[in-house]
Image: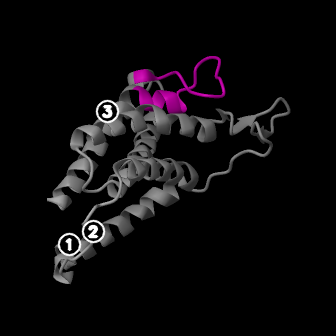
Amino acid sequence: KNTQNILGKNLIVVTVGFLCWWAVGYSFALGMPEHPNRFIGGANFFMDGFWNDKSKFRIWLFQGTFCATGGTIVSGATAERTKLKGFATYTILMTSIIYPCVVYWVWSGHGFLNYKNDQGRYESIVGPPFMDFAGSGVVHLVGGVGALFGALLVGPRTGRFSGRDEAEFDGHSIPFCVLGTFFLWFGWYGFNPGS
C-alpha cells in the first residue's frame, strides 16, 4: 500500500509537474522578457519560440528534471500521511511558481541573487553572487524546505514504529532495491556532470 502510494506520487510529479513546467514553469524560471526584472521570468510560455532556437528544447528537458527532482523530495518526507489530491496541489504550486522563482533568482543571470552589475561583474543584492554547484543549492534547498514544511503540516507517523515485529520492516525485494540503486547510480552520471 505505502509503496504504491509513493510510486503514485512520483508519477504525479513527473506528469503533472512536467505539464506545469511546460506551461509556465520554464517561463518563470528561464524565460527572459525584453526587460528582465530581478524576481521572475516572463517569456516562452508553452515553449513559445523554441523552434527558432532548438537548443532550448535540451535546456527545457534538463531543467525540467531538476524541477521534478525538487518535487519528489517531498513525497518521501510526507509518506503515508497525504492524499494524492493534496500532493497534486503541492506539485502544481512547486513546479509552476515556487521552484521556478528560485531558479530565476540564481541561474537566470538576472535574478536578485546572481546578476551582472553595470561594470559587467556578477553580484547579488547582498554582495557576492550566489554560486551553486551542480544544482545542489537550488534543487535540494527548495525540495528540502518543501519537505520540512510538508512534514510539519502532516505530522509524524503516529504508531507506525511502535510495538511492531521487526520482520514487518524487511525490504520488499532485495534484488529490486539493488537494481534501483544501479539505475540511480547510472542516471547520476548524466544528471550531475551535465549540470
In terms of secondary structure, where does tag 3 sit? helix
Quadrant where the N terminus is found in the figure: bottom left
How far across and how far down the image is residue 113, in percent? 68, 39
Asked which quadrant contains residue 89, the reply is: top left
How far across and how far down the image is residue 50, in percent? 43, 26
Residue type beneath disc 2: Gly
- Which residue has dot 2 on it? 180
- Whether residue 27 is in magenta: the answer is yes
Residue 6 in view: yes
- Which residue has dot 3 on it? 19
Residue 133 versus residue 53 in the image, above or below: below
Q: Which residues are magenta?
A: 24-45
- Whether residue 166 is in magenta: the answer is no
In terms of secondary structure, where does tag 1 sit? helix
N-terminal-most mark, 3 or 1: 3
Asked which quadrant contains residue 108, the reply is: top right
The residue at 76%/40% (across/down) is: 122
Camera-nearest residue between 72 and 110: 72
The mark found on residue 176 in the picture is 1
